[in-house]
Protein backbone atom coordinates (compact mmCIF):
# COMPACT_ATOMS: atom_id res chain seq x y z
CA UNK A 1 0.00 0.00 0.00
CA UNK A 2 1.52 3.32 -1.06
CA UNK A 3 0.54 6.80 0.05
CA UNK A 4 0.98 9.59 -2.50
CA UNK A 5 0.69 13.27 -1.70
CA UNK A 6 -0.45 12.62 1.86
CA UNK A 7 1.09 14.10 4.97
CA UNK A 8 -0.03 14.04 8.58
CA UNK A 9 1.08 15.19 12.02
CA UNK A 10 0.28 12.94 14.97
CA UNK A 11 0.87 13.51 18.67
CA UNK A 12 2.11 16.39 20.77
CA UNK A 13 5.51 16.41 22.45
CA UNK A 14 8.74 18.33 22.96
CA UNK A 15 10.47 15.91 20.51
CA UNK A 16 9.27 16.03 16.91
CA UNK A 17 10.33 13.48 14.31
CA UNK A 18 9.67 13.50 10.57
CA UNK A 19 8.95 10.15 8.96
CA UNK A 20 9.53 10.03 5.19
CA UNK A 21 8.07 6.72 4.11
CA UNK A 22 5.73 6.03 1.18
CA UNK A 23 4.33 2.81 2.64
CA UNK A 24 1.54 4.03 4.91
CA UNK A 25 1.52 0.87 7.05
CA UNK A 26 5.23 1.26 7.83
CA UNK A 27 4.90 4.99 8.48
CA UNK A 28 2.01 4.63 10.88
CA UNK A 29 3.67 1.65 12.55
CA UNK A 30 6.67 3.87 13.31
CA UNK A 31 4.35 6.61 14.53
CA UNK A 32 2.67 4.23 16.98
CA UNK A 33 6.06 2.98 18.17
CA UNK A 34 7.29 6.52 18.88
CA UNK A 35 4.05 7.46 20.62
CA UNK A 36 5.11 5.22 23.52
CA UNK A 37 7.88 7.74 24.25
CA UNK A 38 5.60 10.75 23.70
CA UNK A 39 7.39 11.65 20.45
CA UNK A 40 5.37 13.61 17.92
CA UNK A 41 5.48 12.32 14.34
CA UNK A 42 5.15 14.28 11.11
CA UNK A 43 4.57 11.79 8.30
CA UNK A 44 5.06 12.44 4.57
CA UNK A 45 5.72 10.23 1.52
CA UNK A 46 8.58 12.34 0.12
CA UNK A 47 11.17 14.81 1.39
CA UNK A 48 9.68 17.75 -0.58
CA UNK A 49 6.27 16.98 0.96
CA UNK A 50 7.80 16.98 4.43
CA UNK A 51 9.76 20.20 3.94
CA UNK A 52 6.76 21.95 2.37
CA UNK A 53 4.98 21.68 5.72
CA UNK A 54 7.57 23.98 7.31
CA UNK A 55 7.62 21.95 10.52
CA UNK A 56 10.35 22.33 13.13
CA UNK A 57 11.83 18.85 13.45
CA UNK A 58 14.49 17.32 15.70
CA UNK A 59 15.12 14.34 13.41
CA UNK A 60 13.88 12.73 10.20
CA UNK A 61 13.60 8.98 9.71
CA UNK A 62 14.16 8.52 5.99
CA UNK A 63 13.27 5.41 3.99
CA UNK A 64 16.25 4.48 1.84
CA UNK A 65 14.23 3.78 -1.30
CA UNK A 66 11.21 5.93 -2.16
CA UNK A 67 8.85 5.48 -5.11
CA UNK A 68 9.37 9.08 -6.32
CA UNK A 69 12.77 8.00 -7.68
CA UNK A 70 14.74 10.36 -5.45
CA UNK A 71 18.24 9.43 -4.30
CA UNK A 72 19.24 9.16 -0.67
CA UNK A 73 22.10 11.60 -1.37
CA UNK A 74 19.72 14.29 -2.66
CA UNK A 75 17.20 13.67 0.12
CA UNK A 76 19.82 13.91 2.85
CA UNK A 77 21.27 17.05 1.25
CA UNK A 78 17.87 18.79 1.29
CA UNK A 79 17.19 17.78 4.89
CA UNK A 80 20.70 18.87 5.86
CA UNK A 81 20.07 22.30 4.30
CA UNK A 82 16.98 22.55 6.50
CA UNK A 83 19.09 21.69 9.55
CA UNK A 84 17.34 18.37 10.18
CA UNK A 85 19.46 15.35 11.20
CA UNK A 86 18.69 12.09 9.40
CA UNK A 87 18.38 8.46 10.44
CA UNK A 88 18.02 6.09 7.47
CA UNK A 89 15.65 3.14 7.56
CA UNK A 90 16.36 0.28 5.16
CA UNK A 91 15.45 -3.27 4.30
CA UNK A 92 19.14 -3.58 3.24
CA UNK A 93 18.26 -5.31 -0.02
CA UNK A 94 20.58 -3.14 -2.13
CA UNK A 95 24.21 -2.96 -0.97
CA UNK A 96 25.08 0.03 -3.19
CA UNK A 97 22.17 2.07 -1.83
CA UNK A 98 23.28 1.25 1.72
CA UNK A 99 26.83 2.38 0.84
CA UNK A 100 25.41 5.58 -0.64
CA UNK A 101 23.54 6.22 2.61
CA UNK A 102 26.68 5.52 4.64
CA UNK A 103 28.56 8.15 2.62
CA UNK A 104 25.83 10.73 3.21
CA UNK A 105 25.66 12.96 6.25
CA UNK A 106 23.38 10.69 8.29
CA UNK A 107 23.42 9.72 11.95
CA UNK A 108 23.06 6.05 11.13
CA UNK A 109 21.38 3.27 9.17
CA UNK A 110 18.77 1.04 10.79
CA UNK A 111 17.28 -2.14 9.35
CA UNK A 112 13.47 -2.26 9.22
CA UNK A 113 13.46 -5.88 10.38
CA UNK A 114 15.05 -5.06 13.76
CA UNK A 115 12.92 -5.60 16.87
CA UNK A 116 10.81 -2.56 17.73
CA UNK A 117 12.80 -1.96 20.91
CA UNK A 118 16.04 -1.63 18.91
CA UNK A 119 14.47 0.74 16.37
CA UNK A 120 13.09 2.83 19.24
CA UNK A 121 16.49 2.91 20.96
CA UNK A 122 18.13 4.01 17.69
CA UNK A 123 15.69 6.91 17.36
CA UNK A 124 16.24 7.99 20.97
CA UNK A 125 20.01 7.80 20.39
CA UNK A 126 19.74 9.88 17.21
CA UNK A 127 17.51 12.45 18.92
CA UNK A 128 20.38 13.01 21.34
CA UNK A 129 22.61 13.81 18.36
CA UNK A 130 24.69 10.66 18.73
CA UNK A 131 25.69 8.44 15.78
CA UNK A 132 23.78 5.18 15.55
CA UNK A 133 26.19 2.44 14.55
CA UNK A 134 24.89 -0.80 13.11
CA UNK A 135 26.03 -3.89 11.22
CA UNK A 136 24.58 -2.38 8.02
CA UNK A 137 26.59 0.83 8.40
CA UNK A 138 29.82 -0.93 9.35
CA UNK A 139 29.50 -3.45 6.49
CA UNK A 140 28.78 -0.68 3.99
CA UNK A 141 31.86 1.25 5.07
CA UNK A 142 34.08 -1.85 5.00
CA UNK A 143 33.06 -2.61 1.42
CA UNK A 144 33.09 0.97 0.11
CA UNK A 145 35.88 1.55 -2.45
CA UNK A 146 35.05 5.26 -2.73
CA UNK A 147 36.31 6.48 0.65
CA UNK A 148 39.49 8.48 -0.09
CA UNK A 149 42.42 8.36 2.32
CA UNK A 150 42.84 11.58 4.29
CA UNK A 151 46.55 10.84 4.82
CA UNK A 152 46.59 11.31 8.59
CA UNK A 153 49.92 10.90 10.34
CA UNK A 154 50.19 8.33 13.17
CA UNK A 155 50.02 11.17 15.71
CA UNK A 156 46.91 12.60 14.06
CA UNK A 157 45.32 9.15 14.06
CA UNK A 158 46.06 8.79 17.77
CA UNK A 159 44.53 12.16 18.59
CA UNK A 160 41.49 11.55 16.41
CA UNK A 161 40.88 8.16 18.02
CA UNK A 162 40.93 9.70 21.50
CA UNK A 163 38.88 12.76 20.57
CA UNK A 164 36.28 10.77 18.61
CA UNK A 165 35.94 8.36 21.53
CA UNK A 166 34.60 11.22 23.67
CA UNK A 167 37.74 12.60 25.31
CA UNK A 168 37.90 16.38 25.68
CA UNK A 169 40.79 18.38 24.24
CA UNK A 170 42.06 18.77 27.79
CA UNK A 171 42.03 15.04 28.50
CA UNK A 172 43.62 14.27 25.11
CA UNK A 173 46.38 16.73 26.02
CA UNK A 174 46.93 14.97 29.33
CA UNK A 175 46.98 11.50 27.75
CA UNK A 176 49.40 12.49 24.98
CA UNK A 177 51.63 14.84 26.94
CA UNK A 178 50.79 17.75 24.62
CA UNK A 179 49.36 21.15 25.43
CA UNK A 180 45.66 21.83 24.90
CA UNK A 181 46.52 24.35 22.18
CA UNK A 182 48.66 21.83 20.30
CA UNK A 183 45.82 19.29 20.48
CA UNK A 184 43.42 21.92 19.13
CA UNK A 185 45.86 22.59 16.27
CA UNK A 186 46.01 18.86 15.49
CA UNK A 187 42.20 18.61 15.45
CA UNK A 188 42.08 21.58 13.08
CA UNK A 189 44.55 19.91 10.73
CA UNK A 190 42.61 16.64 10.90
CA UNK A 191 39.39 18.44 9.95
CA UNK A 192 41.17 20.19 7.06
CA UNK A 193 42.65 16.94 5.72
CA UNK A 194 39.27 15.24 5.68
CA UNK A 195 37.63 18.27 4.07
CA UNK A 196 40.29 18.24 1.32
CA UNK A 197 39.27 14.73 0.27
CA UNK A 198 35.54 15.45 0.42
CA UNK A 199 34.82 13.84 3.78
CA UNK A 200 33.31 16.54 6.06
CA UNK A 201 34.60 16.65 9.62
CA UNK A 202 33.23 19.94 10.93
CA UNK A 203 31.51 18.51 14.01
CA UNK A 204 32.42 15.97 16.68
CA UNK A 205 29.82 13.61 15.20
CA UNK A 206 31.56 13.94 11.81
CA UNK A 207 34.92 13.15 13.42
CA UNK A 208 33.38 10.08 15.05
CA UNK A 209 32.14 8.92 11.63
CA UNK A 210 35.53 9.46 10.00
CA UNK A 211 37.33 7.59 12.80
CA UNK A 212 34.87 4.71 12.50
CA UNK A 213 35.22 4.63 8.71
CA UNK A 214 39.01 4.52 8.97
CA UNK A 215 38.93 1.80 11.67
CA UNK A 216 40.59 4.04 14.25
CA UNK A 217 37.89 3.26 16.81
CA UNK A 218 35.39 0.46 17.31
CA UNK A 219 31.63 0.74 17.26
CA UNK A 220 30.09 1.93 20.51
CA UNK A 221 28.41 -0.94 22.23
Image: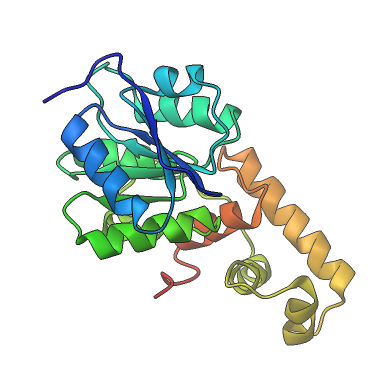
Figure colour scheme? rainbow
Q: Residue 20's spot in the image, x, y percent?
A: 34, 31
Look at 58% across and 71% down and name the residue there. 161
* In the foreground, 174 or 67: 67
Q: Quadrant of the C terminus?
A: bottom left
Q: How many marks?
A: 0
Q: Residue 89's spot in the image, x, y percent?
A: 29, 44
* In the foreground, 35 or 3: 35
Q: Residue 3's spot in the image, x, y percent?
A: 21, 21
Q: Residue 183's spot in the image, x, y percent?
A: 79, 69
Residue 89 vertical placement versus 126 (above, below): above
Residue 164 vertical placement versus 127 (above, below): below
Look at 75% across and 81% down and name the residue there. 171
* In the foreground, 5 or 91: 5
Residue 201 seen in render: yes
* In the foreground, 176 or 22: 22
Going by the picture, which residue comes out furthest to the front?
12
- Is residue 168 shown left or right of residue 134? right
Look at 73% across and 73% down and name the residue there. 168
Amino acid sequence: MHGKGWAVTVGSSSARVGIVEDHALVAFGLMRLLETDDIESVIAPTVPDLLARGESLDLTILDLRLSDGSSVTDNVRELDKAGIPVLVLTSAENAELVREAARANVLGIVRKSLPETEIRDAVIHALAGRPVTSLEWASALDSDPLLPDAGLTPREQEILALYASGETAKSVARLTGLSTQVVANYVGRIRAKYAEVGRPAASRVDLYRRALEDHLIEEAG
